[in-house]
Image (cartoon, helix red, strand yellow):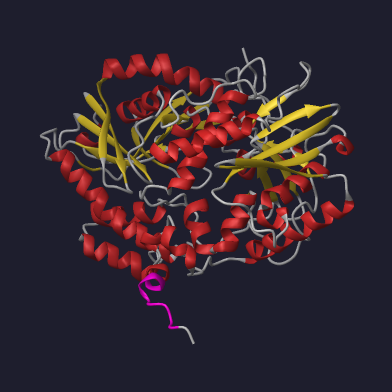
Amino acid sequence: MTVWVPPPGTTGDDSLVRTGLPSTREDARDCPVAVAAKARPWIRADPEPPRRYEQVQGFTLKPLMDTLDLIEHQGLTVAQAIGELRRTNGTFDRKGRPPAHPGLVEWTAAAVSRYLAARAAEEAKGTTRTHPVPDEWVVGQLLRSPDHRGATRYEQTAWGRRYASSDGSVRELWLLSFGAVKEERSRAELAAAAHTVAFGVPSTAGYGEPYRPVEGLPVARTARPRRVRVVGAGCGDGGSAVLLDWDLEKVRENYTEHAVPALGRAVDGTEHVPGSSCVGCKALGGCTALHKAPGVLAPASGRRRPRRSVSATDLRAHDECPARFHLTRQLKLRSPRPESAAIRRGRAVDAWLNERHAALPARGCRHTPGPEDPGDWSAGGHLLTGDEARTGARMIAEHAALCPLDGLGPGEQVRVQPQLTCYDPELDVVVIATPDLLHTRAGGWVWREVKTAGRYLWEGRTLMRTFPQLALAVLMMASGVLGGDTRRSRIELEMLYPDDGGLEELDPGLPAVVDEARAVIAELTGPWLRDTSYAPNPGRRCGDCEALDWCRPGREHLATPPAPPC
């Protein structure tokens, strides 16, 4: 039986174990140690880092939840609640609450109406009518003595919008998604949600305190329901779907079969997997699995911020438009508009190559056939037809002559789209990169990036300025994130065109290459580090911006006729 020990770099009391729905998701890129430490709220970093705060709201659904609370629990009309949202910029006059970005305010105002319409549509189907419940449902278990984990108290929560019938016989939990309804939730997550809804007790807790039952409630608010429903709501499109409708027997069966094992693995995790989990990890200071790379981004300067993660894609997005970066990369808000043909084609080609490169044993693509029907094929869930499909198939054929796995020895390592992570302690920033392909060759590492394009690159810019991810790859490899012999390592850029292909190389062992990479990344990192407001930068890219629906300056820019030529 696993005995979980607080990891190095932490201190505190591990007797309280608190899990929520994220604990059941078991994403392969999450760090088990970070997940397990998060499930113990009384474990803290040692030494504790200074508290730092962002100047804009970083929790996408917080303004929406607060606005709905005004409507469902305080009796305001929709117009009044949205008026308060706009008047206060999402702070609702609460001290210490950072304001929401204007784009988030716009998205929230629209999402409120969509969510309430989805609720009304579900009720119109004739199901048992339910009413908003302000209490948080919590399943608690208090032990007489510490168990094998050292825990004496377990708490299970499920974040969402809560509703119940007038007599308490039916309870509902609505799970909110940014875009469309998220129906692909795991059985473990749904089972944990149903269990908390069915057996949770109305509870409250102060900061750093265990939950305690709310006293003096009417019987209907505390009665155990006979049925529970979990409903998904798409705040981006107004859709909804009943994800489960179970009686208590079915709740118990599914919880025991699916949720209990997943929650056990979550709270017992001891493996270190550096990645995005490092941002909120309490054990980062003592982690030996995370590669430390002081100064990998830029010289430390300016106001210190809460720990963040960044990728080359983030930096490039911020350089193009800070508002778009904040709304789409940080808050994960994207328009439901279809992607352009070039983007769809690129994703499909990328997925096709990944599937081929991940095959075992590893082999090259020189003698691997392309799509059986070049005019109609799919990969990774991306379907292409017609000219778009034929162009993508020709790009796959061009890759066959450039595939780096041809002739690779049987003892070499091959990693397809791995997540690479390093930490810049001077900036308190976690740096993340996802190469298309990594493989060893003769004692060194080869980092391959693959790009598709409909036309040749402009020769007036260097490769690293055109593709900053190459510059970041140079710096990460030069810092030793992969190990191996840097003198034998290289970064490769494979360009695939409809009827051509080419390969470029960068040597991370050459000082001139590293110096240029450092200059490229520093130019992008400096503005990103200093930015606290994420102002829009209207321009030619507004037309295909995923955040245009919530960006007034962008829409005004597109509506303004271009100035006549002089």
Q: Look at the image and say whether residue 561 sits in the magenta stretch.
A: yes
Q: Which residues are magenta?
A: 556-564
In the image: residue 365, left or right of residue 333:
right
Residue 449 seen from this side: yes
Where residue 22 sits in the image (x, y, percent)?
47, 34
Is residue 228 or residue 177 the one in the foreground? 177
Where residue 429 sits in the image (x, y, percent)?
69, 51
Residue lying at 14% horizontally and 33% vertically, measured from the top left:
128
In the image: residue 117, left or right of residue 527:
left
* Number of numbered discs on residues: 0
Residue lying at 40% horizontally and 15% vertically, measured from the top left:
256
Where residue 440 sits in the image (x, y, percent)?
78, 28
When the figure is inspected, residue 496 is found, relative to residue 56, above or below; the finding is above
Where residue 11 sits in the image (x, y, percent)?
69, 37
In the image: residue 305, left or right of residue 171:
right
Task: Find the residue positioned furthest to the top.
Answer: 1
When the figure is inspected, residue 90 is found, relative to residue 262, above or below; the finding is below
Residue 210 seen from this side: no
When the figure is inspected, residue 323 is found, relative to residue 246, above or below; the finding is below
In the image: residue 284, left or right of residue 175:
right
Is residue 223 or residue 160 the one in the foreground? 160
Q: Look at the image and say whether residue 435 sits in the magenta stretch.
A: no
Image quadrant in which the N terminus is located: top right
Residue lying at 49% horizontally and 59% vertically, measured from the top left:
324
Task: Find the residue positioned furthest to the bottom.
Answer: 566
Task: Find the residue positioned furthest to the front.
Answer: 499
